[in-house]
């Protein structure tokens, strides 16, 4: 029977890359909110809260998945996990992208 997991550090490297991605997206969401605040203050609040909040959810979901994978290395303990990190990170990208679109459109109308 083939081993399910690589004895190396692949799950840990994956976790670290997810964490870097989530931190970068949270920073981008906060920056997008700051620049959008000039054109549309209400949208900036939504972008800031949603972008940073969804990045935090993704961060926590990736950590949960890593722990599940790590426990599974020691023996079968249940399902591997779900795609919460992926879906929340995708939602954060969509929210930040929409906010940037609002900034571009509002900036075009005010000039």
Image (cartoon, rainbow, N blue to C red):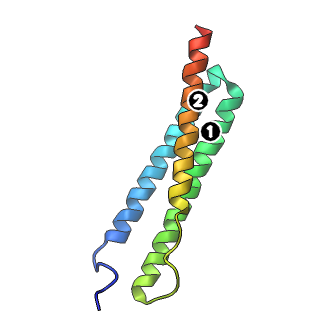
- Crowd tier of the residue under label 2, counting other residues whose Cα lies within 10 Å: few below 14, some 14–19, many 20 or above: some
Res 58 label: none
Task: Determine the residue located farthest toward the right in the rendered image.
Answer: 42
User: Eyeballing the image, is 1 above or below 41?
Assistant: below
Residue at image x 48%, y 75%? 67
Task: Determine the residue located farthest toward the top in the rendered image.
Answer: 111
Is residue 35 visible in the rendered structure shown here?
A: no
User: Eyeballing the image, is 106 above or below 71?
Assistant: above
User: Eyeballing the image, is 92 above or below 69?
Assistant: above
Is residue 66 visible in the rendered structure shown here?
A: yes
- Crowd tier of the residue under label 1, counting other residues whose Cα lies within 10 Å: few below 14, some 14–19, many 20 or above: many
Q: Quadrant of the C terminus?
A: top right
Provide the secondary structure element on which disc 2 rests.
Answer: helix
Residue at image x 62%, y 37%? 47
Please name whichever residue, 26 or 90, is drawn nearer the observer in this view of the structure. 90
Residue 73, image x and y in percent?
40, 84
Sequence-wise first label, 1 or 2: 2
Residue at image x 43%, y 51%? 21
Q: Tags 1 and 2 in contact by the CB under 8 Å rule? A: yes
Question: Mark 1 and mark 2: span between their CA atoms?
Answer: 8 Å
Residue 90, image x and y in percent?
52, 49
Left or right of 46: which side holds 22?
Answer: left
Task: Determine the residue located farthest toward the bottom in the rendered image.
Answer: 1
Residue at image x 52%, y 80%? 79
In this figure, which residue is indicated by the disc labeled 2?
Answer: 34
């Amino acid at each position: 029977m083939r081993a399910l997991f690589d004895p190396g550090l692949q799950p840990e490297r994956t976790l670290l890359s997810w964490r870097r991605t989530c931190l970068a997206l949270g920073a981008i969401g906060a920056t997008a909110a700051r620049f959008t605040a000039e054109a549309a203050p209400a949208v900036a609040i939504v972008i800031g809260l949603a972008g940073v909040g969804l990045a935090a959810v993704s961060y926590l979901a990736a950590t949960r998945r890593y722990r599940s994978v790590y426990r599974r290395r020691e023996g079968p303990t249940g399902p591997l996990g779900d795609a919460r990190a992926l879906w929340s990170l995708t939602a954060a990208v969509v929210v930040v992208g929409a906010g940037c679109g609002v900034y571009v459109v509002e900036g075009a109308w005010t000039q």
